[in-house]
Image (cartoon, rainbow, N blue to C red):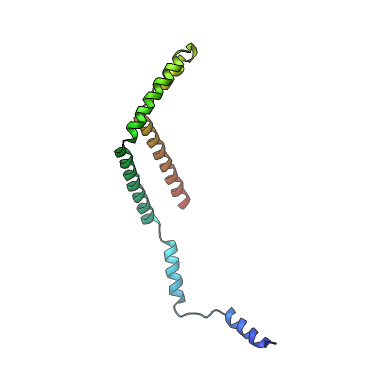
Amino acid sequence: MSDKTFEMDLERQFAATPILPDSDTFALRVTARLDRGWTFRQLLIGGLGLIGGLIGAGQVLGSGLLSRLETISAQSDTLVKSGIASLPAARGLTTLLSVGSGMDSQVLWMSAGLGALAVGLFVTRAIREL
């Protein structure tokens, strides 16, 4: 059978936290680190993301993927036009499909949409931090 007083003394000693001489300095340093702005980190992450995006775009452009997609798009356009042209009611759809079907305009619209999304996310983050 164990001694109950020993267990009670041990629990009391572990329950009482000793006060260290530099506890105030430690608390101030931790508070300063938590209160420090994230501006540099956000700029670093955003800059590295931009660099990574440019490298990825360069790789896609250098691989010839866009030219292959352009030929596939042209072939599918001719297929759709020839199939739909036989239907008299679908001639308006043929002209609608042929307008703005170039890959360059699609890339520009996609880039503009992603840019608007990025600005929206930045604004919501800035509003939330205020």
* Residue in the image at 46% along x and 46% along y: 124
Residue 115 versus residue 86 in the image, above or below: below
Look at the picture and state if 124 lies above or below 30: above
Q: Nearer the viewer, residue 23 or 101?
A: 101
Above or below 25: residue 72: above
Total numbered circles: 0
Q: Position of residue 79 (x, y in %)?
A: 42, 20
Using the rendered view, name the quadrant where residue 11 is placed. Answer: bottom right
**Quadrant of the drawing holding the N terminus:** bottom right
Q: Residue 39 placed where, x, y %?
A: 38, 55
Q: Residue furthest top?
A: 88
Is residue 130 visible to the viewer in this orientation of the structure? no
Q: Is residue 18 left or right of residue 122?
A: right
Residue 116 place in picture, x, y as percent: 41, 39
In the rendered image, residue 72, in percent from the top left (x then y), is placed at 38, 28
Spot the residue most to the right. 1
Residue occupying image coordinates x 35% and y 29% = 70
Q: Nearer the viewer, residue 4 or 32?
A: 4
49 or 31: nearer the viewer: 49
Task: Let me know if residue 20 appears in the view.
Answer: yes
Q: Is residue 32 above or below residue 102?
A: below
Q: Residue at x 32, y 47 (%)?
A: 51
Residue 68 falls left or right of residue 19: left
**Image point (39%, 32%), residue name:** 109
Residue projecting furthest to the left = 62
For residue 94, what is the image quadrant?
Answer: top left
